Amino acid sequence: MTQPPSLPPRGDDPRTPQANDPRTPQADPRMPQVWDTRIEDRTPSSPPSPSPSPSEPQPSPSPPAAPAPHGGRSFADAATAPPGFGPAPQPFGPVSATPDAAAGGPAEGGSTKRRKALAIGLGLVLVAGAGTGGWLLWGRGGNDSSPKKKTTAGPIDAKLDWMAPVPDKDKEHADSFPSPWFTKDTIVLATRYAVTAYSRESGKQSWTLPVGGRVCNTSTGSDGGVAAVVWGKGDYDCDKLMAVDIGHGRQLWSQDVVDSKGRTQGRDMANLSVDHGNVTLVDVVGDPYVYAARTGKQSKAPDYGCQQQGSVVKGSGQLTLAQCELITGRQFILNVDPKSGQEKWTWKVLNGIAVQNVISVSPAVLVVGRENDTSASDIVPLDDKGRMGPLISVSAGPYDLDGCRPRHLDSCRRVVTDDRTLYLATKTDKDGLNSIAAIDLATGKPRWTAPLGGTRTNRPLAMHEGRLLVYQAATQEEGGKLLSVDPATGDSRVFMNLPQESAERELTLARMGSAYFRDGRFYIVSDIGMTDSTMIMAFH
């Protein structure tokens, strides 16, 4: 049986917070480096507060499902911290009061029967708009100008507003489609040869921007209306970087990515981010590249003392992955103020372990695996001082992390977090069914595990009005559903019913696609070409 990698000696505790050195150097006014002995000698912060006493009120979770046998040994197998780390980690803080279930108990249906005869007569009659790139369905001229108001009377019966086809040039290629970007009025998607915006209301193409070659990689998010694209003139060049104004459909700048010796190379595996007015490209080797998002002017990257592997920025928080020796060197996670560049704390990743993804920045939640292995083994929560919480074994569910691309830090599309809980799906069984699990980040244990009806595939979607939204895939006979789930108990009610008339198309696209909920609208977007003729489905 494969044994876990050797653990660091006692005293090299990866949970120990790395506070800023109070001594201010005079001769070398540089930022602290992760290899500095003075960082090792920093005074640890006060020990964490003790766990809440058993007498304190706690949520009453439903009994968790018995975990499946582990497929392999995980670092979370033991009930306490691994030897050499000292006492077991404390919870992140007192458990807050049970979230208000506000909307009451579960509501079953409330949906009226579809008028199938009318739907058959009108359904899927495609009104082609010349040059629009989208299809309006059932003769609709567009959506309501504003999202539907919140209602407690019953679920929303959504309509399929529009579908957008896969561009002709992409139909013969099995390229992965990156995550879309959303603006106030459009959903923007990069395909093989162009970046295109579709009206969120009608599905018509608002604009399309030819890239001039092949799109290789994109930033997961945008900032200030700017997104970034790695591209190349040849299929495998991937040596150019461009910034796109996704609000107006124009290229801001494009240039070769050239190293210090004037060489170019493929950057299709680089981590690419746009935040706080900068575009940052970080590859496995070499220095990071930082450009002003609007002008393309290059600037010097922050020096954290080791090779940066990428950063994920969400709001006012940033997690940066650094590695001091390539291939086999130890990794570090740095919590950095994205405005000032000031390091808040550093977590030393366990020896023999590599960080694969950042699920959340605040709270800090990571996906890790063994070195030189692309499969995830554990999920690691860190508290607000950089101390490691209990490891969550991926095989214990077993949990579904297929939406996370190894080494692409900000790529997990099917995991949701709030300030105290991780929500993720279990792997599907032989019948294609699964459950949603809510994992307490302070204890690493399930608060609840729920099949949510037990007849469909479930995936967590987003937090909405204090509750978890879950997408239940369509069946051959019935459209999909969005469920609103109480975070404390796992009790659910139907939030949105998707139409039966498009169920078969929805089922096909969702199998190889990702789901998004934005401003009252629900989207399914293909993840890869050649799997379906439809690229986007939009419901409202």
Image: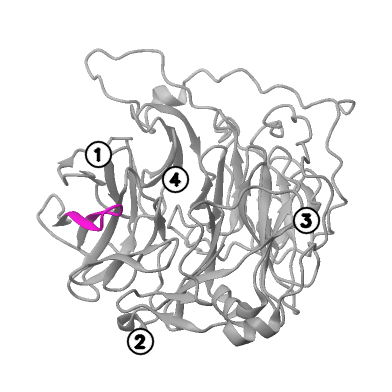
Q: Which residue is mark 4?
A: 330
Determine which quarter of the picture holds residue 530: bottom left
Categorize mark 4 by other alpha carbons within 10 Å: few (<14), some (14-19), many (20+): some
Is label 2 in a helix, a strand or a loop? loop
Q: How many marks?
A: 4
Q: Which residue is mark 2?
A: 172
Label ID, residue 493: 3
Which tag is nearer the camera, tag 4 or tag 2?
A: 2
Prevalent SS, magenta region: strand
Report the span colored magenta. Answer: 243-252
Distance CA(mark 3)–CA(mark 2): 41 Å
Q: Amino acid at mark 4?
A: Arg
Q: Where residue 197 sits: x, y (%)? A: 34, 63
Distance CA(mark 1)–CA(mark 3): 48 Å
Camera-nearest residue between 493 and 281: 493
Which tag is nearer the camera, tag 4 or tag 3?
A: 3
Q: Which residue is mark 1?
A: 301
Question: Does the magenta portion include 246?
Answer: yes
